[in-house]
Amino acid sequence: MKKIKGNSVSAGIAIGKAKIIDKHELYIERKKILKREIEFELSRFKEDVEFVINELDKLIQDYTYSQENRDILESHKMILQDPEFNNRISKLISNDQNSLEQAINTYFTEAADIFSNMNNKYLSHRVIDFEDVAYRLLSHIMDERKDVLENVDENSILIMENISPSFVTKVFDKNIQGLCTERGSSNSHSSIIARSMNLPMLVNALGLLGNIKDGEDMIIDGNDGYVIISPTKKVLEKYQTIYKEEQKDRKGLLKLIDVEPITKDGKKIKLMSNIEIPQEIDQVLKYNSAGIGLFRTEFLFIDRDDLPTEEEQYEIYKDIAEQCKPNSVIIRTIDVGGDKLSNILNITYEENPNLGCRGIRISLQNIPIFKQQIKAILRANVQGNIKIMFPMISGVNELLKVKEIIEICSKELINTGIAFNADMELGAMIEIPSAVITSDSIVDECDFLSIGTNDLIQYTLAVDRDNQSISNYYKPTHPSVIRSIKLTVDNAHKVGKKVAVCGEMASEKEYVKLLLALGVDELSVSPGRLLLIKKEIINCNITEIKSKLDKILSCKTSKEVMKLI
């Protein structure tokens, strides 16, 4: 038995047989064409691009289970329809007398190199989109298509070096068990599709291809992030039990959709959803969430070559507010570092973006962009159910500056005669130690606080949460983290204001009782975890866990805390 660590991008257990998928290599012959052949190559180019676009249209039509999947495939069409793509290929054929195959290979190699060399992990995953389009087009031109899924059945777990978005879409129809790759990103289009399909998936399982054979028994543990190869009988039986329990629990949780999240001792907890992309609103409504506690707007800004306009943002915010009404929608202003926007903003490369210009800092250093977002939110709030909060607040000064900008935006909208509603609650994210320590001052300048536990743990414990080598230091129940949450809650409650937790601690059932005992008023979780967390709330007796609170707050280690909760 072998066990390999990976990064889970879609939770769940998968048990099956390994199916190694090798991409069929295409040999591109480097040769010059004759001048009399140029027109023929150009006509081939036009016909072949039209064929692949039509093929993508058919794929989009056949796989309409998720709007985000359609959008990703539409983006592949846009690559082929890009005037720059057509102009560059035409010049490589006409001026340099490249064959069509060589011209296409040259163009996509150049494009992939540009994204790969950006020193930007949030954009580098776009390389796979270009590779996918190039492979699809060249395979058609060279008539060397190979159905790698021909012998894949529903018992298969696909193993690849990396996986393209359109391939994940094709996989859906095969009803396979799971996916695992040696490379990949949690923010990639492929990962987004896998999550939308509830398909267990791991990426960055380094060394996997060298340690597994086609047809071997294997398990994907998408909950803890492991691949288990040739499991022992005991391990296999353990995971089979977990898998059956997951399936049973998933069906049972659906019965809770219309049940109120009220604890055993009668306290009603507001349970909301976090969303990253607008398409997730379907799940928010399906599971009867009490609104959106965190809309991460940065996904409107990254993975593109230009900034979203005020109008584009307004339409998205308005649509979400309309669908959620009468429930509230809390929009968090852009929370990214310069590393994610380096292709559209003139920002100096930073060695450590997490401690650099990110969150509210990047907004306050790019006022015109910030004002666009504020105006879009003010306009969308005509519905009256939008709240706004600001990330990475370190002290009161930032909130005071934000308020000034909101006032300026309101006056400018009045002058243009555009309808808007500035009557909305303002909130601050508490996610760095300075915000915790001065939370008594911060809460005086806003209407509510929301604790982002992911960054709070990272900054409090000085642990990069993406660094696997020090992951054992990332402890949500570290006494310093627990006391930080308690201090924040106490400071807010002194002035009659509420505190939510929208970080991953809220989505993990083992921490729910602790958070409620600490006095947290609201929880906001990923839509897919909402019913699970609701079940935990319903089974929780806050009075009982509060009786242990003094002992919990006096604990010296995370281990002691975990024992008590």
Image (tube, grey):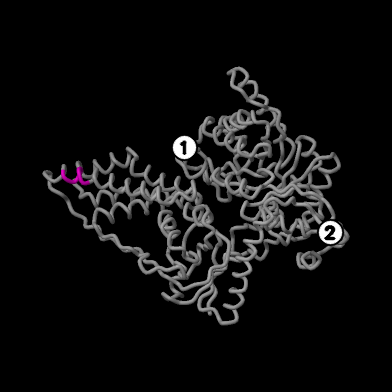
Q: Is residue 182 visible?
A: no
SS at circle 1: loop
Q: Residue at 65% across / 24% down in the picture? A: 410
Residue count near mark 2 (Cα–Cα under 10 Å), binned few <14, some 14–19, many ≥20? some
Q: Which residue is mark 1?
A: 306
SS at circle 2: helix
Q: Is residue 404 visible?
A: yes
Residue count near mark 1 (Cα–Cα under 10 Å), binned few <14, some 14–19, many ≥20? few
Q: Quadrant of residue 310?
A: top right
From the viewer's perspective, tell me whether residue 564 is left or right of residue 474: right
Residue 504, compared with residue 308, is above or below; it is below
Q: CA distance from mark 1 to mark 2?
A: 48 Å
Residue range in magenta is 40-44
Q: Residue at 58% across / 50% down in the picture? A: 352
Q: Classify the position of the C terminus by image quarter.
A: bottom right
Q: Which residue is mark 2?
A: 553
Between 199 and 30, the residue placed more toward the observer is: 199
Instruction: Give x and y (percent) for residue 94.
Output: 19, 41
